[in-house]
């Protein structure tokens, strides 16, 4: 199964029998069998025909709409799952401050552990490990120990924010100086690395949202992220532990191995200080999908225990883990962590 990304401006998505076609000026420029299609992500000015929409809804294939620069706009999805009991348990858990805090702590701990692992792994693979990355990894140990000692969500968010700022101070030493990356800035991203991080997080949120919905949750009620209209808070909660593994590590790799170069980016305006070219966007989307297909050992990856599965499957398994905790079948949520 695959994700179809459509970035050709002015193109239209249609269907021909059991295939989805992408057409521009009446010419077919791409075609994918429905049986091999998991979902579609559309960037910018791309149309989609009514027959194609109906065919996709019938098959349960979701369509995500983004702006040309990669900002999320909305999704086309079929009927929601009828897991009423799980959603009732989710609402009850969110109303229990103690249980909600324990879950939020697990999400943050998983994120910080994976941030530390990323810094350690990239440092080990260098002839001269950057001192800034090693120091940041060591400092994250202190923050990880503080997570379980928090007694309020506000204090937990303070620990998470301070730890993440320290992490990015170390991460910048792993990226070449030609990228001029000085730290994490989001709105708007002022440089190519920040743009790639934001785009990667948006793509990852789309993947996690699908897993959360497939498990039967209400994706808009979370435990770490606050309730806000239109925000898929639970998907953002579950996404935290995967940010360093699937996006941060990918950005470091593509900026260092030549898959993306500074020439793939152009100056923009005040609202979009930096713009990625179509060639650069294609390269990054291909690298992201390759990362999602990479296999990792998950404790529940095989029928009898640990086994190797693609990262996309790891996300789904974590959503099911969370469902068992919400239902009361397990006491604690174990985040997915790498070494």
Image: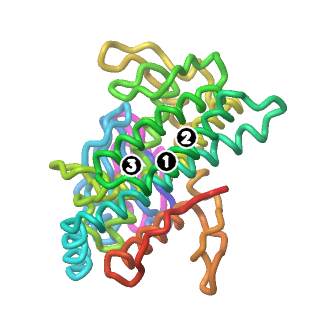
C-beta proximity under 8 Å, tags 2 and 1: yes
Q: Residue furthest right?
A: 127
Q: Quadrant of the C terminus?
A: bottom right
The way the protein has been coloured in the rendering is rainbow
The numbered mark, 1 or 3, whose residue comes first in the sequence reads: 3
Instruction: In the rendered view, tell whether residue 80 sits above or below residue 150.
Output: below
Q: Is residue 21 magenta?
A: yes
Task: Please state if 65 lies on the left or on the right of 300 as rendered.
Answer: left
At numbered mark 3, what does the secondary structure look like: helix, strand or loop?
Answer: strand
At numbered mark 2, what does the secondary structure look like: helix, strand or loop?
Answer: helix
Q: Quadrant of residue 248?
A: top right
Depth check: give the residue in front, 267 or 38: 267
Q: Gap between marks 2 and 1, in whole Å?
A: 6 Å
Task: Please tell me the numbered disc located at residue 41.
Answer: 3
Task: Name the residue: 65% across, 33% down.
Answer: 135
Residue named by callout 1? 243
Task: Name the residue: 58% across, 59% down.
Answer: 337
Dot in front, 2 or 3:
2
The numbered mark, 2 or 3, whose residue comes first in the sequence reads: 3
Task: Name the residue: 39% across, 43% down.
Answer: 202
Which region of the structure is painted magenta? Answer: 6-32
At numbered mark 1, what does the secondary structure look like: helix, strand or loop?
Answer: helix
């Amino acid at each position: 199964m695959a994700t179809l990304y459509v970035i050709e401006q002015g193109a239209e998505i249609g269907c021909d029998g059991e295939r989805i076609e992408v057409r521009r000026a009446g010419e077919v420029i791409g075609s994918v069998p429905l049986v091999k299609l998991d979902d579609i992500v559309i960037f910018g000015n791309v149309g989609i025909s009514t027959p194609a929409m109906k065919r996709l809804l019938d098959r349960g294939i979701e369509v995500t709409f983004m702006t040309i620069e990669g900002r999320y706009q909305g999704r086309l999805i079929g009927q929601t799952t009828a897991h009423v009991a799980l959603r009732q348990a989710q609402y009850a858990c969110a109303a229990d401050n103690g249980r909600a805090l324990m879950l939020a702590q697990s999400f943050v701990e998983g994120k910080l552990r994976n941030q530390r692992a990323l810094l350690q792994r990239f440092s080990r693979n260098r002839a001269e490990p950057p001192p800034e990355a090693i120091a940041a990894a060591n400092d994250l140990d202190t923050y990880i120990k503080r997570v379980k000692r928090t007694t309020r969500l506000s204090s937990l968010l303070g620990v998470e924010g301070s730890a993440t700022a320290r992490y990015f101070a170390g991460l910048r030493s792993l990226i070449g100086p030609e990228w001029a990356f000085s730290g994490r800035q989001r709105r708007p991203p002022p440089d190519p690395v920040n743009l790639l991080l934001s785009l990667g997080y948006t793509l990852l949120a789309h993947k996690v949202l699908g897993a959360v919905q497939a498990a039967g949750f209400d994706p808009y009620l979370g435990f770490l992220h606050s309730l806000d209209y239109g925000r898929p808070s639970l998907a953002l909660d579950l996404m935290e532990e995967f940010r360093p593994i699937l996006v941060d590590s990918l950005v470091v790799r593509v900026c260092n191995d030549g898959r993306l170069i500074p020439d793939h980016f152009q100056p923009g305006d005040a609202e979009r200080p930096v713009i990625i070219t179509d060639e650069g966007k294609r390269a990054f989307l291909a690298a992201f999908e390759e990362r999602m297909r990479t296999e990792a050992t998950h404790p529940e990856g095989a029928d009898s225990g640990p086994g190797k599965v693609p990262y996309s499957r790891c996300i789904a398994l974590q959503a099911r883990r969370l469902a068992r905790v919400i239902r009361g079948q397990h006491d604690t949520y174990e985040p997915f962590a790498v070494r």
